[in-house]
Amino acid sequence: MKFSVSSSDLLKQLQIASGAIGSNPVLPILEDFLFTIENKKLTIAATDLETSIITEIEVNADSNGKVAVPAKILLDTLKELPQQPITFTVNDENYGIQITSSYGKYRLAGENGDDFPNIPEPDNVDTVKITTDTLSQAISKTLFATSNDELRPAMTGVYLQVDFNKLTFVATDAHKLVKYTFNDVKCEVSTSFIIPKKALNLLKSALSSGGEVTLSFNKANAYFNFANTKMICRLIDARYPDYNAVIPVDNPNLLTMSRVDFQNSLKRIAIYANKTTNQVILNINNSSLTVSAQDLDFSNEATEQLTCTYEGEPLTIGFNAKFLIEMLNVLESDEVKIELSSPTRAGVLFPTENEEGEEILMLVMPVMLSN
């Protein structure tokens, strides 16, 4: 089997697929890309048995065939080559591979492509179509709030609720929560499932703007299909917590202020906060917000005052500055609103303006005030 292809075009596709290769694969062949040539089209597949990525590229080929190619040595070689046509020659008997460039020849040992694990095919799936830009937004706005706690697997992914013409993405780690909803979709079903964080990170870096993604799903897997790339991931088999139960409904106190001013103030004040709790204190009354922090261990403290609009009783509440900064980073409006009820109940953040067809709500648990 012999084929030639542009080195830079091939590298681009390999870099997308390489995200699915795990750092400690359970089988040696999982360190490889599976190359399959059919009708002058090269399909590249990579998998860690949980997440798989398949991408394709046009090549000049003399025949069909398949071979497993060691990923690291191939990627390292292509990164060091300037853009040029390269030729792969594969020995069909021992799977030896020779790459020829304008500089010389490189030999590496491949493996039998038939030994590569089967990648799940869409079977008995429901489908929803969504623009790549909307999906990118949904991932960016929720992924940071997922948990790293392996003992609570459901919270290590993003919960996706499909409800006919509406999609809701939810992420929480029990300290913070994000709920992002948009209406610009059509689907025949109402269902929900949990997508792992790794898959969404890979998806986010592979999506290019201006296209469309077909998302298909069954009980076991989600299948993302866009441009010339497919991504398949095994869903997290766990029950997602009832997130609606933790969103406080009756919040009589409403604080409105500039998002950027508040975020910048938090970044400065957080420098003086206790490094374990990152606690900042918000002292709020009718037209002024005092943001303060102290670290008694080192006698550090800082205070700033911001202008704001506030409706409600004067209130003093503590939050983790790191969480607030992350949330304000994701909200895009000029001003934000925070609904509050008491120093022991969660604060709920909203942008003052949502983009058309979308809604976002964020919740942050208070850090208890210490006397």
Image: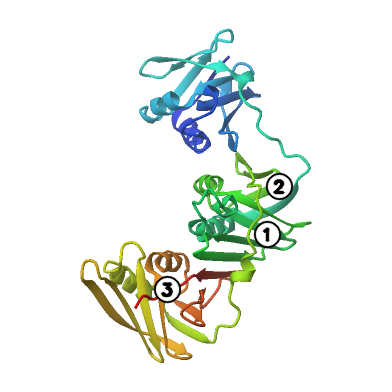
Q: CA distance from mark 2 to mark 1?
A: 12 Å
C-alpha separation, residue under disc 1 versus residue under disc 3: 32 Å
Q: Position of residue 262 (x, y in %)?
A: 37, 75
First in sequence, mark 2 or 1: give its number: 1
Q: Is residue 362 visible?
A: yes
Q: Quadrant of the N terminus?
A: top right
Between 196 and 331, the one nearer to me in the picture:
196
Residue shown at the point (63%, 70%) measured from the top left: 245
Is any atom of residue 357 visible in this view?
Answer: no
The answer to whether the residues at label 2 and label 1 have Cβ atoms under 8 Å apart is no
Q: Position of residue 321 (x, y in %)?
A: 38, 68
Residue under numbered circle 2: 217
User: Nearest the camera: 127 or 248?
Assistant: 248
Identify the mark nearer the N-term, 1 or 3: 1
Name the residue furthest top: 93
Q: Nearer the viewer, residue 279 or 184?
A: 279
Residue 125 point in image, percent of width and height = 76, 45
Report helix, strand or loop for mark 2.
strand
Examine the image and state in which quarter residue 180 appears.
Answer: bottom right
In the structure shown, which secondary structural element does the residue marked by tag 3 occupy?
loop
Residue at image position (60%, 53%) is: 154
Could you say which quadrant of the image residue 79 lies in?
top left
Confirm or deny contact between disc 2 and disc 3 (CB under 8 A).
Answer: no
Viewer-nearest of labels 1 and 3? 3
Name the residue beneath numbered marker 3: 368
Q: Is residue 103 left or right of residue 302?
A: right
Q: Nearer the viewer, residue 159 or 263?
A: 159
Q: Nearer the viewer, mark 2 or mark 3?
A: 3
The residue that mark 1 highlights is 161
